[in-house]
Amino acid sequence: MHLDVQVLRDFYYRSALGRAAQKIIRNQVLDFWPEAKGQTVAGYGFAVPLLRPYLPDARRVVGLMPGPQGVMPWPAGMQNVSVLCEETQWPLETGHTDKLVLMHGLETSQNPTEVLEEAYRVLGPGGQALFVVPNRTGLWARADQTPFGFGRPYTSGQLEAQLKRHDFVPEAHVSVLYQPPSTRRFWMKTGPFWEKTGRAIPAIMAGGVMMVLASKRHPPRHRGVGEAARVLSPLDVLTPKPGKVAEPV
């Protein structure tokens, strides 16, 4: 079950806890991918908070938002790059995406297998995907007041096994968000301490979010000839539609 786009927007852009989470996750994304000059970068689910650093130099940035979630224009004050799409039919050419981020898209989908098939399809040879999902053993997966409290949380073994079945090769994984998912002043103030401590002793503390970096296996091992050659007609980035969220982010 996907959360409504307004709920996600309010958490990441209008709450102190959400802004703190956004910063921590985005910094880790930049550790994996410091730059994307001349590349195509896409995000599926509600990944747009993580894509902003790539806007100046990437050849193209696209924010794919699934129909059950809804779409909002993004980024504020610039040409819109977000588009509403079907969960299993993304308006991207086959094999033309260099970097792909999925956040609040896999664990909330009723069709995770098809979502992973689309992720594989759009990536080019050597392309990489970054999967951001709730950690089953972390506190954030149990907190309904955050978006990571919805959907199916994963363990690292579960996620990596699922990725391998769809011809992704896991290359690195890391846990983030060690601070409790609380808006109380003490926990917010001590957030950097918990993040540093949790990464130093991950065997004792469980991060709330897992991030797995995986590359596209090419040629694939588990597909019939031509199975991954389906081509969708690419769409131009849509302009905001009436009735959709149009507030600055």
Image (spheres, rainbow, N blue to C red):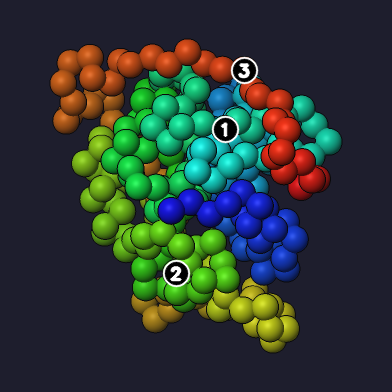
- Name the residue furthest bottom: 186
Q: Residues within 10 Å of mark 1 (few under 14, many from 20)?
A: many
- Which residue, as the protein is rendered here, is positioned at the far front? 243
Mark 2–mark 1 Cα distance, whole angstroms, equals 26 Å
Q: Which residue is mark 2?
A: 141
Mark 3–mark 1 Cα distance, whole angstroms, equals 11 Å
> In terms of secondary structure, where does tag 3 sit?
loop
Q: Number of numbered discs present?
A: 3
Residue 84: give its label. 1
**Residue 105 percent coordinates (x, y):** 46, 46
Q: What residue is shown at x 43% (from left), y 78% (from top)?
A: 205
Q: Is residue 222 left or right of residue 112?
A: left
Q: Residue at x 61, y 49 (%)?
A: 5
Percent coordinates x, y for residue 86 in the rendering: 46, 32
Residue drawn 68% across the image and 83% down it: 184
Observer able to see residue 198? yes
Which of labels 3 and 1 is toward the front?
1
Badge 3 or badge 1: first in the primary sequence: 1
Q: Closer to the camera, 27 or 17?
A: 17
Residue linked to disc 3? 236
- Badge 3: residue crowd in 10 Å (few <14, some 14–19, many ≥20): few
Task: Characterize the local packing of mark 2: few (<14), some (14-19) or many (20 or more) Cα atoms within 10 angstroms.
Answer: many
- Judging from the image, what secondary structure is the residue with disc 1 in? strand
Secondary structure beneath label 2: helix
Q: Is residue 144 above or below residue 162?
A: below
Q: Which mark is residue 209?
A: none
